[in-house]
Amino acid sequence: MITRRDLFSITGRMAAGSIFTLAWWNALRGRIYASEKKYDLVAVKGGNSPVELFNTAISQMGGMQRFIKKGGSVLIKPNIGWDRTPEYGATTNPDLVAAVVRECYTAGAAKVYMFDHTCDQWQACYKKSGMQATAVKAGAELVPASSSGYFVKTSIPGGRVLKEAQVHKLFLECDSIINIPVLKHHSSTVLTASMKNLMGVVWDRGEWHRAGLHQCIADFSTLRRPDLVIIDGWRVMTRNGPRGYSVSDVQNMKYLFMSADPVAADSAAAMVLAQSTGIKNPTDIRYIKIAGSMGLGRNDLAKLNIKRITI
């Protein structure tokens, strides 16, 4: 339940951050390209719902048919890791995810799957996050990741530290992958977005922490690059992540970032949290810097063809 105190806290935090976020948004221009060139990144803000932002962004990116195989299988990977309702900003917005599922079927997908290796009890997470109701209604098959039997020992030849991992079978087998994280603060990595969201497709997350979390996040990205990244910045947890304590940790930012480049997507999304985290550039986040240096994507926003849209 949102208390009166929570409501005043949220309103005050939104007002304090509004000047900064406007300045950042105006700086998110990228380079000027000929209009017929495909965008590296689409950033949308405002509107009445995350579904509206998604519909706007996917049309600018050329449609879902660019990113999935007609007649093939699609894995959608949201963040469903916590036993939290959507207003806490700990999990991906379920209405956004349902819209992506529907769009995949419209573009010709034969089957859409969805899972997360949750931190809290998986059935509670799937239900309370809203995914169990919305994803299934939209036509997705919501599958478990609660047992090691769903995972396969997989070599990661491009990894510098992470040389192998137990990876969920669907991540390896599906024809297309769409990564839909929620943007939020994270106590271990400053923030979490698309690259870190892939920790939810491995069995032993503890290994990453022991071996060096930032390098392992980048290393795992060498295994398989998602075909499309959609970062949910509608409700953004700006502190006490990744689980959060209260709705007062959340600001209604109303952003969405879409790209086929996970490093670019995370780089743009990172700047939304610049005020609350103190970062000055995307490369202040170590895994973003490492991933760029490994050639896994681009973290220099000034060199990207970015389409900004305010609704």
Image: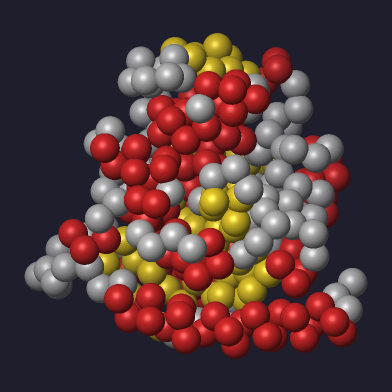
Residue 219 left/right relative to 11: left
Quadrant of the rendered image containing residue 206: top right
* Residue 6 seen in the figure: yes
Q: If the image is split into quadrants, where does the C terminus sit?
A: bottom left
Vertical placement of 188 versus 184: above or below? above
Q: Nearer the viewer, residue 161 or 265?
A: 161
Q: Write the residue at 48% across / 14% down.
A: 164
- So how many labels did they put on this image? 0
Residue 99 point in image, percent of width and height: 57, 62
Residue 126 point in image, percent of width and height: 77, 46
Query: As drawn, which residue projects farthest toward the front?
Result: 278
Residue 213 left/right relative to 283: right
Q: How is the image coloured?
A: secondary structure
Q: Nearer the viewer, residue 153 or 251?
A: 251
Quadrant of the rendered image containing residue 205: top right
Residue 176 left/right relative to 120: left
Vertical placement of 124 versus 89: above or below? above
* Residue 110 seen in the figure: no
Q: If the image is split into quadrants, where does the N terminus sit?
A: bottom right
Q: Nearer the viewer, residue 230 or 297?
A: 297
Q: Write the residue at 42% across / 83% down.
A: 22
Q: Nearer the viewer, residue 225 or 274?
A: 274
Q: Write the residue at 54% across / 45% down.
A: 189
Vertical placement of 255 versus 294: above or below? below
Residue 145 point in image, percent of width and height: 70, 29
Q: Write the residue at 51% across / 27% down.
A: 212
Residue 220 point in image, percent of width and height: 44, 28
